[in-house]
Amino acid sequence: MADEHGSWKTFGERLVYDNRWVKVGLVDVQAPNGERWDYHVVHLARIAIALIVNHQDEALMLWRYRFATEQWGYELLGGMVDDGEEAAITAAREAAEESGWEPVGEAEHLVSFEPLPGQVTAPIDVYVWRAAKHIGEPTDTEEVGRVEWVPLSRVTELAQRQELLGSGTLVALLYYMASRNV
């Protein structure tokens, strides 16, 4: 793959910032035109997302505020994958903690993707369940919001109104809906 037309060469990376949530590196690169320089790359932790859909064709989501973009909107449930934990387990755990609803049955891998591959590594894995049981109130007090079953028929409208927050939510919902119509 490295010899493919248009490929870049890398000669190493030096971390300039490193913590649990984000790492920033300077990667020694050579572009296809032969130029060589240090390129900033941001590395984010792997994220696992739960798409829980019920028999009424509704998805379980959290209406919440995101201060970084100063937006209110809907998000699917999920979070950072802990070291040594399987992504599907993370998605199920985060769904229960953030919503009080526990996914039922085996997780089905829906899609994995990188939302900003030009300068950011941010792997996202999405899993789908078709049932959940209510186990109580949300226990994750940091992820406060209003838990709702949102009709999938509203996805396009919510996307147009910019009320679906983040690529994890948008890609997961649109991919799920498109794959049902194949």
Image (cartoon, rainbow, N blue to C red):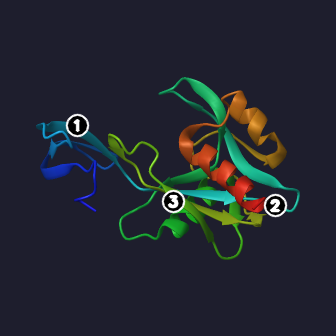
The relative height of residue 62 versus residue 127 in the rendered view (above or below) is: above
Work out how far the residue at label 2 is from the one at label 3, CA to CA, in angstroms: 22 Å
Q: Is 135 displayed left or right of 113 in the figure?
A: right
Left or right of 171 in this view: 158: right
Q: Which image quadrant for residue 36?
A: top left
User: Which circle marks residue 54 in the picture?
Assistant: 2
Q: Quick one: quadrant of the N terminus?
A: bottom left
In the rendered structure, which disc, 2 or 3, sits on the residue that comes first in sequence?
2
Residue 179: % across, % down? 71, 60
Q: Which of the 4 image quarters holds residue 96?
A: bottom right
The answer for how far apart the CA atoms under marks 1 and 3 are is: 24 Å
- Could you say where residue 61 lies in the image, as x and y percent from the top left? 70, 47
Residue found at x 17% / y 51%: 9
Residue 112: mark:
3
At horizontal 56% and vertical 39% (from top left) the residue drawn is 166
Q: Which residue is mark 1?
A: 40
Which residue ends up furthest to the top in the rendered image? 70
Q: What is the three-letter code of the residue carrying label 3?
A: Ser
Amino acid type, callout 1: His
Dot 2 surroundings within 10 Å: few (below 14), some, or many (20 or more)? some
Q: Residue at x 46, y 45 (%)?
A: 115
Indicate the amino acid at tag 2. Answer: Asn
Number of residues whose C-alpha sits closer than 10 Å to that of mark 3, classed few (under 14), some (14–19) or many (20 or more):
some
Q: Are marks 2 and 3 in contact (CB under 8 Å)?
A: no
**Closer to the N terminus: mark 1 or mark 3?**
1
